[in-house]
Image (tube, helix red, strand yellow):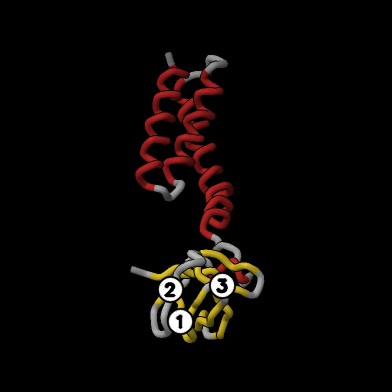
Amino acid sequence: MGPIVWFIAAAVLAGLELAAGEFTFLMLAAGALTAAGVSLAGIPLWAEVAVFVASSAAFWFFLRPYLHKQFHKPGAYDDSPRALVGARAEVLEDITPHGGQVRLDGGIWSARSLDPYETIPAGAHVTVSDIDGPVAVVWKEP
């Protein structure tokens, strides 16, 4: 009966971790799983509790800082032109089927419309849908 109680405690603690998201309950759940594993050997209840406390403390002090560092580190900075997809731009020169210009990210880019039959007048605002080499493919905002 002991291992079942520890498994249930681990499941409840893991469920609470989903709400908290700070790895606290996850470390306690890992301690409960460790206690469930040693309780299968038939050790007394006081030893199971001692294993739970010791293993939870060990997970807390050694595993939790590593998990925090891994999950809270900033993402990689993308400075490629693909990072401009979804950005807004201002049309400087009418965008016709043959080309045009937009001010995008502080620079002037050649541009063409996503719809080749649409002409976008100067002064309009557009959204970048793709970067095709040195040309921004844009569509007019509503």
- Gap in Å between the C-alphas at discs 1 and 3? 11 Å
Residue 32 vs residue 126, the one in the foreground: 126
Q: Where does label 3 land, which residue? A: 136
Among all residues in the image, which is located at the extreme left? 142
Q: Along the polypeptide, which appears first: circle 1 or circle 2?
A: 1
Amino acid residing under circle 2: Val
At horizontal 49% and vertical 85% (from top left) the residue drawn is 93
- SS of the residue at dot 3? strand
At horizontal 41% and vertical 48% (from top left) the residue drawn is 21
Q: Where does label 2 land, which residue? A: 126
User: Where 45 sits versus 107, above or below?
Assistant: above
Q: Which mark is drawn over residue 91?
A: 1
- SS of the residue at dot 2? strand
- Gap in Å between the C-alphas at discs 3 and 2? 10 Å
Q: Along the polypeptide, which appears first: circle 3 or circle 2?
A: 2
User: Where 77 sits versus 67, above or below?
Assistant: below
Residue 1 vs residue 73, the one in the foreground: 73
- Gap in Å between the C-alphas at discs 1 and 2? 7 Å
Q: Along the polypeptide, which appears first: circle 1 or circle 3?
A: 1
Is the C terminus in the top left, top right, bottom left or bottom right quadrant? bottom left
Residue 40 vs residue 54, the one in the foreground: 40
At horizontal 37% and vertical 47% (from top left) the residue drawn is 20
Which quadrant of the figure has residue 99?
bottom right
Which quadrant of the figure has residue 98?
bottom right
- SS of the residue at dot 1? strand
Task: Residue 95 in the image: state x and y as whole percent.
Answer: 49, 78
Task: Residue 137 in the image: state x and y as whole percent.
Answer: 54, 69
Q: Are marks 1 and 2 in contact (CB under 8 Å)?
A: yes
Among all residues in the image, which is located at the extreme right? 133
